[in-house]
Image (cartoon, grey):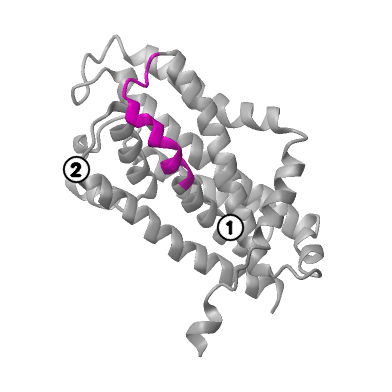
Amino acid sequence: MRTIEILPNISYRFLWVWYRNLIVWTKFYKSSIVANVGEPFLYLIALGYGFAPLISDVNGMSYMQFLAPGLIAYTAMNSATYECTFGAYARMSAQKTYDAIISTPVGIEEVVAGEVLFGATKSLFASLTMMVVLFLFKLIPAPTALLVPFVVLLTGFVFASMAILFTSFTKSWDFFSYYFTLFIAPLYFLSGIFFPLSTLPQWVTTIAWFNPLYHSVELMRGLVMGNLRPDMIENALWLLIFGILVFMYGVARIRKRIIV
């Protein structure tokens, strides 16, 4: 019986939470997309053009081609993380939006599901914009890149779930410094975006395998470059299972914080 109680009780009503957030976001979507795309675009220009003359080949591709798919994954992670940390915390604690919503037939589990779905949706919008930029730079050569949005949504789901879980523990705005500095930053640098992880010591690559961003980058790179491999199924399954587990824990934590 206890196992049943801890499972999220989610109905179609979570879509109303997602729709509410979407309507609010449309009032400032331009600045939001620029903020999420601006940083990876600067990385593309600064590092891509900066290192390209110095690095002739990375795993059979130019450095710009190596870098570009990882920046799509980074954009997805960045957008979902910010939305479900600062955005979710504002709605939960400062604006008391959660309290208002759960006074309706919408439950707290559906609020969390709507938040996570919206975080993944913002990842999709930002990543599609980044893909247009990369296409203009002729850095998306393979038609299999059409499958990238599915990986973006999966990546957004994972990092939105992780962010909402951390937000459930957060007591003030300052707590997010711990999350971004001690957790997100190491994931970012140990994901294979900027250099192959094979250049690192074996124990580091073993730890990096558990990094969800690493699996997202591997999927993005394979699809963008048209280099499909059997182990990409493993990457996708790892992201899906990890995301579901973190999401369920995040739901339980937010329920405990708001209801209990």
Q: Quadrant of residue 257?
A: bottom right
Q: Is 140 a magenta residue?
A: yes
Looking at marks 2 and 1 on the same chain, the residue that comes earlier in the sequence is marked by 1
- Residue stretch rendered in magenta on the structure: 138-153
Residue 28 or 165: which is nearer the viewer?
28
Q: Is residue 19 left or right of residue 181?
A: right
Compared with 30, 228 (above or below) is below
User: The residue under label 1 is which amino acid type?
Assistant: Ile
Residue 46 or 65: which is nearer the viewer?
65
**Main structural element of the magenta stretch: helix, strand or loop?**
helix
Q: Is residue 67 left or right of residue 105?
A: left
Provide residue 207's location: percent of width, then percent of height: 28, 52
Nearer the observer, disc 2 or disc 1? Answer: 1
Q: Determine the secondary structure under disc 2.
A: loop
Provide residue 206's location: percent of width, then percent of height: 23, 51
Q: Which residue is mark 2?
A: 201
Q: Is 241 a magenta residue?
A: no
Provide residue 7's location: percent of width, then percent of height: 52, 76
Which quarter of the rendering shows the C terminus?
Answer: bottom right
Residue at the spot 28% in from the left edge and 34% down from the top edge: 222
